[in-house]
Amino acid sequence: MDTPSGKAYNHFGEPLVELRKGTEHIWIESSGSSSAPEGIPASECTMEYLADLIKEKRQLEIFPQFFPHIDRLVNEEIIRVHAELFQYNFSVEKTSLPEPEGEPITVQEKVYVPCKEHPDYNFVGRLLGPRGMTAKQLEHETGCKIMVRGRGSMRDRHSEELKRGKPNWEHLDDDLHVLLQCEDTPNRVYLKLKTGVEQIKKLLVPARQGSDDLKRKQLMELAIFNGTYRPVKQQMRKSQLTFFLLL
């Protein structure tokens, strides 16, 4: 496991793992640290810069064994710039945890998704975010594991129907919900779980159209992941060129 220099901490002051590389994408897990890389001001961590880094990363993948050090440096830079740009503001209030007492226990709680009240709203996409990054940041900040379960929780509906009723898939018979799990000592674990439940309930309140900053960031993040992001200035130049050609 590669770990960039510097340490990051979650909402409860606990150390976090900064990087875990997947087999296809490097966008697996980020520490949530908002510090920019040394020598690069935060103001220079732009969407255009991140898009360029991802483009360079894909070019390096053509020669995976020739530039290992460059590839590592680009990976670290991508992780850091991404953390600077895509920190979702969950407004998690700082909770003072007592010193651990007793043996760790695991507790969990379900939060049901209001699908009947808002049948056309994409709650799953809002909760998870591109590559699951929204849920991962919330896990870091609350100390809870967050899982979407129940009917409609799987992307492949055909596969969901095949698994329904089978062992270990009993949750598919339940309504769509978020399952939060937390492991800690009894005098700490319920405080963490309470914070996690509060944040999930906030996300399950649909924002008014045009005022959803979370959705805007998620769409921009997805465009960068997919390589379809275009800087605003570049889009304006293309629009202006099209306008003059039509004159």
Image: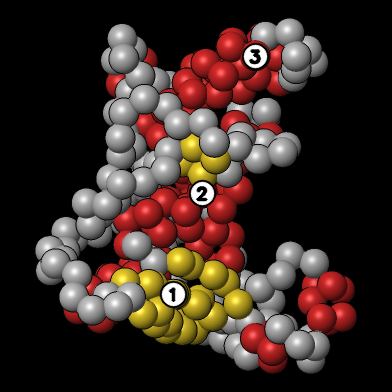
Q: Which of disc 2 and disc 3 is earlier in sequence?
A: 3
What element does badge 1 sit on? strand
Mark 3 crowdedness (10 Å alpha carbons): few <14, some 14-19, many ≥20: few
Q: Residue at x 32, y 56 (%)?
A: 141
Q: In front of the other: label 3 or label 2? A: 3
As shown in the figure, which amino acid type bears the numbered disc 2? Answer: Met
Q: Position of residue 6 (x, y in %)?
A: 31, 28
Q: Which of disc 1 and disc 2 is earlier in sequence?
A: 2
Q: Is residue 66 above or below residue 133?
A: above
Rounded to the nearest angstrom, the CA distance separating label 1 from label 3 is: 38 Å
Mark 2 crowdedness (10 Å alpha carbons): few <14, some 14-19, many ≥20: many
Q: Is residue 149 above or below residue 237?
A: below
Q: In front of the other: label 2 or label 1? A: 1
Q: Which residue is mark 1?
A: 181
Total marks in image: 3
Which of the pair 63/91 is nearer the observer? Answer: 63
Q: Which residue is mark 2?
A: 133
Q: Residue at x 65, y 14 (%)?
A: 68
Q: Which residue is mark 3?
A: 68
Q: Residue at x 69, y 76 (%)?
A: 152
